[in-house]
Image (cartoon, helix red, strand yellow):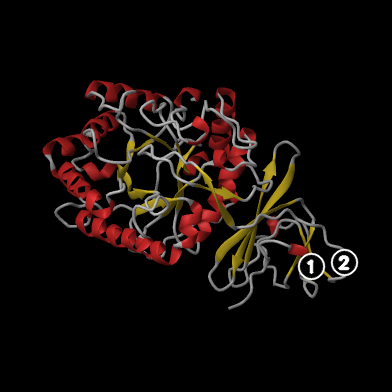
């Protein structure tokens, strides 16, 4: 296996390496390196995001943001411009030329014991991520994920500019099921805010029926969930039948679109941090995803869209050999608040950097999505630089939307008063739709 073109850290430690003087160039050497640029309106100059690949797998393993014409240290490769117009400057210089250090972001993730918001409201240990480097303000320079097979399900998702999805649970403040009328009013509000898609964690509280009908009336899409709790796969299995029954019932046909309930479903998500919370092993989850695929993919059922799970980034990285082969897309819950080095203003850059790492998990072969992200509006304490509060939530959510909104599902539509306070006392205060 060839070595990575750049190391993830310690870029200047390669004493025998050559150096490259980079303007705006795309490199293509065994899919080893690409440089993509965009204009920074603030300074009217190019900012270059370098995405690093391991040559043998074409997988990104780090992200660097460098100024134009910065000298960086790397192994010698051949530079092939994507087009003549894309070149501003390129030259190979001797390794004795002083190199200017580029910012570096390690792909490593270290565990800590912070709590993490989850649909069940149960406390869970959150990972502590490496601090984000300075990143460009858009995911347009991120590596496009491609399907590993031409027969893979379609992974197109519907966005409205930088708005995509928001999570929704059909519970009232006491944790009881909302009426169909209350759900319809909520979904109308979501539609009015410009979101295109609603994420449901489970089919409980007749959510498939009430949310499905309301979503159809506003031309909204759905991300459907099969929730796995402490009862494991056995406890989650009946939810498969609920999805099958919904899809085949006459009411769901009417509530779908054009005669099929599945036409509004962008993906089915099996589990929400189920491995991370210890409810199942990665192997058990992989097998269950296969079971869901077989049940929903029957000709009589007719679901042909993507099936995936969502975990913390660290959990996916640790279990990629098991989980990547059974998923059509790769998804994670990426929460900047649970990194003590990230403040509200840095939330968008953090999520963007985490999405780039997420793109690498399955060797860059699958579309990638952030299925849960946000910032609490209230809490009993701060997590280092991460401070809960209304002003902070507004700043963070708007930053996430600007930098990564087209691939991020915001958490959540409204506060969840029925949950336990959890670590930092923030679990009940993630409702953020009021900022849109």
- Pointers 1 and 2 in contact (C-beta within 8 Å): yes
> Residue at (67%, 63%) from the top-left corner?
81
Residue at screen point 46% across, 56% down? 315
- Rendered location of residue 370, percent (x, y): 47, 46
Left or right: residue 231 compared with residue 154: left
Query: Visible in this render: residue 161?
Result: no
Residue 361 visible at all: yes
Instruction: Provide residue 131's location: percent of width, then percent of height.
Output: 65, 47
In the displayed structure, does residue 163 sit left or right of residue 304? right
Camera-side residue of 89 and 342: 342
Q: Where is residue 35 in the image (x, y as percent from the top left)?
A: 66, 58
Q: How crowded is mark 2: few (under 14 residues within 10 Å), some or many (20 or more)?
A: few
- Please tell me whether residue 365 is drawn above or below residue 305 in the rendered image: below
Which quadrant of the view contains residue 393? Answer: top right
> In which quarter of the view is residue 3 placed?
bottom right
Q: Earlier in the sequence, mark 1 or mark 2?
A: 1
Residue carrying label 1 = 19
């Amino acid at each position: 296996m060839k070595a990575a073109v750049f190391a993830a850290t310690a870029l200047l430690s390669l004493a025998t390496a050559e150096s490259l003087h980079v303007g705006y160039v795309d490199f293509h050497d065994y899919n080893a390196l690409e440089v993509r640029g965009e204009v920074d309106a603030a300074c009217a100059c190019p900012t270059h995001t370098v995405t690093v690949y391991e040559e043998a797998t074409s997988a990104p393993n780090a992200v660097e943001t460098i100024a134009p014409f910065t000298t960086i240290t790397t192994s010698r490769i051949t530079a092939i411009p994507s087009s003549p117009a894309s070149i501003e400057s390129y030259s190979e210089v001797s390794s004795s030329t002083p190199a200017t250090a580029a910012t570096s972001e390690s792909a490593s993730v270290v565990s800590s014991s912070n709590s993490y918001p989850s649909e069940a409201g149960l406390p869970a240990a959150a990972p502590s991520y490496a601090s984000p480097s300075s990143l460009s303000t858009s995911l347009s320079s991120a590596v496009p994920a491609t399907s590993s097979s031409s027969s893979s399900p379609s992974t197109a998702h519907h966005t409205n500019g930088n708005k995509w999805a928001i999570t929704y649970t059909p519970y009232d403040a006491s944790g009881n099921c909302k009426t169909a009328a209350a759900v319809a009013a909520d979904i109308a509000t979501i539609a009015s805010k410009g979101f295109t898609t609603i994420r449901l964690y489970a089919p409980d509280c007749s959510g498939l029926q009430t949310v499905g009908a309301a979503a159809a009336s506003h031309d909204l899409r759905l991300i459907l969930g099969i929730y796995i709790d402490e009862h494991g796969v056995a406890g989650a299995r009946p939810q498969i039948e609920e999805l099958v029954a919904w899809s085949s019932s006459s009411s769901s046909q009417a509530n779908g679109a054009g005669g099929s309930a599945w036409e509004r479903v962008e993906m089915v998500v099996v589990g929400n941090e189920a491995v991370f919370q210890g409810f199942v092993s990665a192997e058990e989850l992989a097998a269950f995803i296969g079971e869901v695929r077989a049940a929903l993919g029957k000709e009589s059922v007719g679901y042909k869209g993507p099936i995936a799970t969502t975990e913390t980034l660290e959990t996916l990285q640790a279990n990629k050999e098991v989980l990547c082969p059974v998923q059509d897309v790769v998804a994670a819950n990426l929460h900047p608040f649970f990194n003590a080095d990230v403040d509200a203003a840095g939330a968008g850059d953090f999520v963007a950097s985490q999405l780039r790492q997420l793109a690498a998990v399955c060797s860059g072969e699958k579309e990638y999505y952030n299925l849960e992200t946000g910032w609490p509006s209230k809490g009993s304490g701060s997590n280092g630089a991460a401070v809960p509060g209304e002003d902070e939530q507004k700043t963070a959510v708007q930053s996430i939307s600007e930098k990564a909104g087209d691939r991020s599902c915001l958490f959540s539509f409204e506060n969840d008063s029925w949950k336990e306070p959890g670590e930092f006392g923030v679990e009940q205060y993630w409702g953020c739709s009021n900022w849109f």
